[in-house]
Image (cartoon, rainbow, N blue to C red):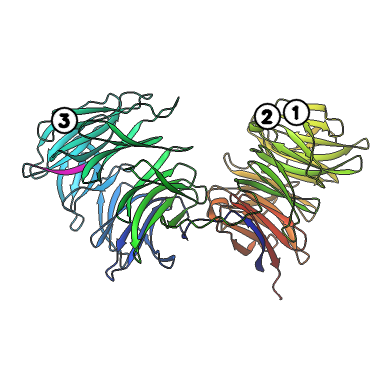
Amino acid sequence: MLVETAWASIVPRTEREILEGHTGPVRAVCAFESPAGVTLLASASQDGTMRIWDPATGRQLRVLHGHSGEVTTVLALTGVLVSAGQDGTVRTWDPDSGRQLLVLPGYRGGSRVEVCGEGLVASATDAGAALWDPATGRIRQVFPEADHAMSALQAQGRTLVATRCGKAGVGVWDLATGEQLWRHHPDVHTTSGVCAVTVGGRTLVASAGYDKEMDNGRARLWDPLTGELQLTIECGSLVERTLDRVCDVRPLDLDGRQVLLGIGQKTVRVWDPTTGALLQAFIAPSQWVESTCLLRLDGRPLLAISERYRGTIHLWDPATGQLVHSLTGERSPIEALCAFEHDGRTLLASADGHSRTVRIWDPQHTPPRARHRGHTDEVLGVWAVGGRLISVADQSVRIWDPTTGTPLHRRRGYLFGIADIVELTVAGAPLLAGAFSVYDAGTIRLWDPATGRQIRRLERRWEEGPSLLCPFTRDGRTLLAAGDEYDVRTWDPATGRLEQQSPCGADTTWLGRVVIDGHPAMVGRSRNHGLRIWDAEAAAWHPAPTGLHPADGDDGFAFMLRDRPLVAHAEKNGTVHIQDLLTGEPRCTLRGHTGNWITAITTMTVAARSYLVTSGGADRTVRLWDLDAGNCVLIIPVHHETLRAAPLADDLLAVAVPAGVLTYRLRATPS
């Protein structure tokens, strides 16, 4: 099977490079220099691996295996990489060969691992916070009752280590002797961060914390030798009617002196550590602050700030408080940021959770936005209806010529929560019906596909909103059945009248439409009733054969293949099991997707042969399967999260991704 892109309508990306290879969310990324003097990147992932990348070519150089679970941290020291994972170990690696050097057990998985003075690594253990030498694995000190969040500092010729103590405490230890100099519990609820900051020639310890769940918190400065409180800085509210707890504090060199950064849930603040005065503040435009990274452009310090869930990086000047510009890419949580130098330019690398990628950005260059004739907001899905392609985004529905990609009609409006679109004929005229979730008041909208004009809304309060539509004929009239979690309702689309409402029990999930003996039907699943078939014409439930009960939490789909109704359930590891809906007999098991869920299953015909199409979601692929042989005949690397797939005429396949619509032409290879 061969594939080529027929046409695409995609919002242009601003990333310089996207590095694909991880099969789980990427949790951390760092830059390091190879023995040949080349800057490389290392990433850590939930898939249990670390990967080494060449940012100049985008090529994956090697995969580092060893952890038995999620890898949460990767750090670069001179000649060695340090990783930590949920398996309770900290490990060191030779980045040039990928060889594992040391394994240190006893690490408390989930806590931070960080570099802490004199090339030592700090990690939390059940006995306390441990400082150890990554070259030898020898533990220099263990500080009982101390936790992660450490900072080394010098005071009167002594090397001290400030740590978080327990959940709500701060303390200072002597690195040489292991002696605890002092310990305080200033925060009733949580101490969230510790650092050292220089104030008027003196090095002080700064801590951040809060007293209760609904408290923004405060920063405190302490004398490192005596533990005497020097200053308290209240984290006042900058965002109306919302919580903005201080999560961390860091020093920042600015205009020849050090200031104190306060990283909050919604803001980043710059404080004068001498007076506690607020100098500047960044307020996240629409989401929470997820990660931050300091970089320098043309000698000017800037802060890169990512927003949770949006995939946006803001470049902010902490000296002036001005937003320099923003970098926007695929909508995916950015778990971590790091800055590095390449060919004389400062670049950024981001670890992306949902998209399972490492993205490289050029903060000095934002490509101009090309004229874009498609959706500019997030696309939710595509449907092939009546020889047209329908795509729906948050703010618009568009109708396309599927062969050329020419936009035919556009309808604006708030359309979040689209679940299904079908075609039906009313009074001899074709209409489109769209089902919307409770976020859109749970409505069904009817459109004229020729003009894109909305004809009618079928409104009645739903508990969750309809998720599946099924047009059918009864007594010579075209009716429309719609199902949500609690009810099946039947409407007359010509009049907008609700004709029938039947309860289906709580927690019903609708798997798809099928045709049984020429009659349209809907397949649903619930905890109490298992898998059932709703006969739309008879308005009655029919039990499905035994053995058709997907495991709780698995994704289910019902569809037609060569006039035969089938049902599929997809495990969280991407395995798909296909069964005959009428007999319960297994057809085949499909393995290959690496995503945590399958987002869509449909069928299509290529060169008069029927295939199953699966959309892998986060694994960024669409796959074609020959169910007779039980094997995959084509993998389409989409390079975006895949949402839905819609088969079209002339061997075309449309794929919805958050950034737009991609359409592929498939060709059977000559035998």
Residue indicated by mark 3: 183
Q: Are marks 2 and 1 in contact (CB under 8 Å)?
A: yes
Q: Please say whether residue 153 is one of the residues in the magenta stretch.
A: yes
Amino acid type at mark 3:
Arg
Q: Secondary structure at mark 1?
A: loop
Q: Secondary structure at mark 2?
A: loop
Q: Are marks 2 and 3 in contact (CB under 8 Å)?
A: no
The one nearer the camera, 248 or 16, is 16
The one nearer the camera, 363 or 38, is 363
Q: Position of residue 515 (x, y in %)?
A: 80, 46
The one nearer the camera, 588 or 104, is 104
Quarter placement of the N terminus: bottom right
Residue indicated by mark 1: 459
The one nearer the camera, 409 or 76, is 409
What range of the chain is rendered magenta?
Answer: 151-155
Whether 285 is drawn above or below 39: the answer is above
Whether 120 is drawn above or below 218: the answer is below
| Residue 90 in sight here | yes
Q: Secondary structure at mark 3?
A: strand
Residue 109's image quarter? Answer: top left
> Is 422 placed left or right of 246 in the picture?
right
